[in-house]
Amino acid sequence: MSKSQELNERSLCLLKTLVERYIADGQPIGSRVLSKDSELKLSPATIRNVMADLEDMGLIHSPHTSAGRVPTVTGYRMFVDSLLTVKPLDQQLLTQLNTGLTSQTQDSGEVIGKASRLLSDLTQMAGVVTLPRHEATQLHHIEFLPMSNTRVLVIYVTGEGQVHNKIINTDREFSAAELQQASNYLTSVYTGQSLAAVREAVLTELDQERQQVNQAMLDAVNMAQQALDQPEKEDYVLSGQTNLMGFSELSNVEHLKQLFDAFNQKRGVIHLLDKCHSTDGVQIFIGEESGYQAFDHCSLVTSSYSVNDEVVGVLGVIGPTRMAYEKVIPFVDVTAKLLSAALNPKG
Amino acid sequence: MSKSQELNERSLCLLKTLVERYIADGQPIGSRVLSKDSELKLSPATIRNVMADLEDMGLIHSPHTSAGRVPTVTGYRMFVDSLLTVKPLDQQLLTQLNTGLTSQTQDSGEVIGKASRLLSDLTQMAGVVTLPRHEATQLHHIEFLPMSNTRVLVIYVTGEGQVHNKIINTDREFSAAELQQASNYLTSVYTGQSLAAVREAVLTELDQERQQVNQAMLDAVNMAQQALDQPEKEDYVLSGQTNLMGFSELSNVEHLKQLFDAFNQKRGVIHLLDKCHSTDGVQIFIGEESGYQAFDHCSLVTSSYSVNDEVVGVLGVIGPTRMAYEKVIPFVDVTAKLLSAALNPKG
DNA sequence: TGTTAGCACTCTTTTGTATTGAGTGCTAAT
DNA sequence: ATTAGCACTCAATACAAAAGAGTGCTAACA
């Protein structure tokens, strides 16, 4: 009785080799192979007993009577949490990453895209990088341009050259000169502050100084308020989706459709990625743990990246549950660090 | 002898109903069904004779001895070219299109995206719209902003609020004031001209007036030249890719992967879409006609759209070869016209 | 001469049955 | 506690037979 609940060294060791072997081969592992594969010198019969225990504990599972065993989600979880021996990152991969992310003359958008691409290319799975949190980035410049009648094009530049734009409708028609003046005023006052701060400042300024401030500036602030009104929705860059079509465990078209639909919706994925914002270090969602049905057969390995020591985004790799965690984890970890480095204002 | 090469009224009529029926059912059509389905009162035996002729001519094809017949690519081609009875566009679809494309306060990018989305949503296939040809659009404003050291952010606005930006490296450091002056100079001189014209003008100005013109303007022109140097690559907006995963004829994961890879490469698709630039009216590629293996089982129905009576882009629908051409064709046609209308400067 | 009924034939699809092989669980021996 | 042995389960494979769909051809017919 006590035995069946006890997770002794031996059981764990066997679980470990079972998972490793299953990740390598993709086929259910029977007692015979496990007996040969493990450094423990045990007979298949003994191993069968242990396996029965592991199955009782919900760590492995048998597809049917005459098949071997396969790790369950909790089995994988135990594996990555306490059994995994992380491999140091392949040197060649490291240099590829480094050269890919460090090249000059790129705005941050390009770097993000490049990172996503590298994640997918070097893992042969799907790579994802969220765009830096809009709110946290600094305002670098804001400009109003006349379009037609009362329509005004607002352009504002944040961080290292990310350009955002939006068309707003104004109450009355503005001349090019007026708009120019507004641009100058706002840029001079608010440059260097975070967008969140600017939004707040603009709102209070609208409230308090309505009477005192001169009309031109009031107009400027008003337009800024409209432009920054609803925060831009979060977004991410996904690469290598087609890589996922190669994996036999996802080869069911129905599953694939669900997965790709989820990618297109973006909502769910963003929500999932947001969960990693808080934690630092690598975080992993295995199969159903994500809570999204479309990801039932996938795992997600993520890490957050920062600018100026503040977490502004998340990046990661999406692949089948059966992935080489021992390689992917350090890979994602390093990529996050390199991306942070690449995005930080140069020395 | 002569008979087997002759495409009389009756054969064509049967081909037509065969294709229609096959498009509706998706299963090979036998002589019995065709006999019942056709308005011609002919026995299955007679129909078998006709079908044998059609097969000789390469218009239909039998998957195997005991299956019915299926249209070949040339069969489809004949069908859409001369047999098709185009259905007038469903009134409800029309209003949906209209309201979707006509709403206010959208920059052209949004309209393009919306069009693509509508194409896919309303056909339940994939929709594609190329971005308006960059070269042909008018320059509306150009602006230089200092980033760090010698890096300068160039922002230029074209057409109805499309914002482009690029970071360039300059020979020396420029002050904000200098850049402002350059912006003003270029904007005042070149606003309203097409990008292609601007590029040309800039180049000649660099050549000819190197001595006479003042240094500030020379710098400005120099930077503009760098920014407009290599033309932006063509691009398109694709929607509803996942719709394609629902079709049984494409449900082979291998095919799907090829197709989606092609979508990601973009190169091939763009090349294909470019072929439609010249022609006006609806153009159709059926199966292998496209010349791209990934599209072997797909058809592409396209039409070009214009701004100021000049063709600037192409839009279309991608779906399985077996699609309801009689509905899709008018739909694509109308969408192209509505998009042209939506993009043309108002009033 | 064009159309049709009839029939033999082909080939896929389905269904059923037997066999093989992998792997287990249990029991009894070590 | 470990292990050898054995009966048992179940998927996968192979094979055979039957059913079904549709054709091509021939001969009869209007």
Image: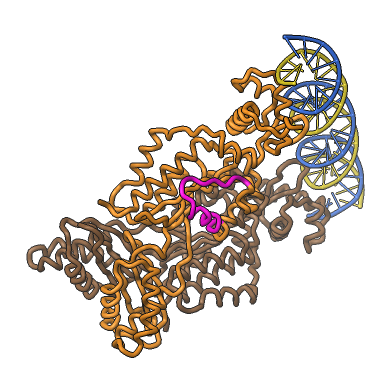
Chain colours: A brown, B orange, C yellow, D blue
Residue lying furthest left: A211
Q: Is residue B123 above or below residue A224?
A: above
- In the rendered image, residue B271 lying in the magenta stretch gets the answer yes
Task: Give the quadrant of residue C20.
Answer: top right
Where is the N terminus of chain B found, in terms of image quarters?
top right
| Towards the viewer: A144 or B323 | B323
The picture quadrant where one finds residue B60 is top right
Can residue A77 be seen in this snapshot?
no
Depicted B168 relative to depicted A39: above or below: below
Q: Position of residue A97 (x, y in %)?
A: 57, 73
The residues colored magenta run B269-287
Task: Report the residue at 22% width, 75% height from top.
Answer: A188
Q: Position of residue A176 (x, y in %)?
A: 20, 67
Could you tell me which residue is drawn at 71 percent across and 34 percent down? Answer: B5
Q: Does the segment drawn in magenta span residue B250?
A: no
Residue B131: give x, y in percent of width and height: 43, 57
